[in-house]
Amino acid sequence: MNYLDILGLFAGTCVTLATIPQILKVWKTKKVKEISLKMFGTLTFGIAIWVVYGILKNDLPIIITNSISLLLNLIMVYFIIYYEKE
């Protein structure tokens, strides 16, 4: 693993971790009125494309961090759809 891989993993980790506080807040409060489904949907779609890009480039830092980020954002999209009904 070279310094560019380490830099990529660090950057991807920062971006991935940024979603966790929002997920925890929604999980605890069950309130999503102020959260945009369109924004999270677009973000999730973009992250999915990053995963495909990482696979095509065989770039492990992109694949790993964006796969985790994709999972977290899918959880957030699910929460928005589920709690919006309440």
Image (cartoon, rainbow, N blue to C red):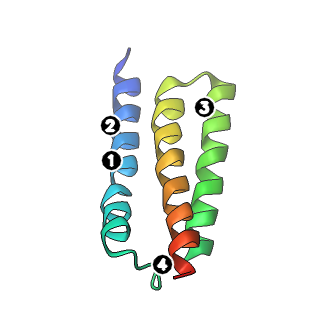
Which sits earlier in the primary sequence, circle 3 or circle 1? Answer: 1
Q: Position of residue 21 (x, y in %)?
A: 30, 61
Tell me how far mark 2 sits from mark 4, CA to CA.
27 Å
Element marked by disc 1: helix
Q: Which residue is mark 2?
A: 10
Residue under pointer 3: 54
Where disc 3 sits, the SS reads: helix
Query: From mark 4 to mark 3, how far is it between C-alphas?
Result: 29 Å
**Quarter occupied by residue 53:** top right
Circle on res. 85: none
Question: Label 4 belongs to which residue?
Answer: 35
Q: Earlier in the sequence, mark 2 or mark 4?
A: 2
Point out residue 35 in the picture as x, y percentages from the top left corner. Answer: 48, 78
Label 2 packing within 10 angstroms: few (<14), some (14-19), many (20+): some
Query: Residue at position x 47%, y 40% from top?
Result: 68
Say above or below: 6 vs 86.
Answer: above
Q: Position of residue 86 (x, y in %)?
A: 51, 82
Tag 4–tag 3 contact (CB < 8 Å): no
- The residue wearing badge 1 is 14
Q: Residue at x 63, y 53 (%)?
A: 46
Q: Is residue 47 left or right of residue 56?
A: left
At a point 61% along the width and 42% down the height, the residue shown is 50
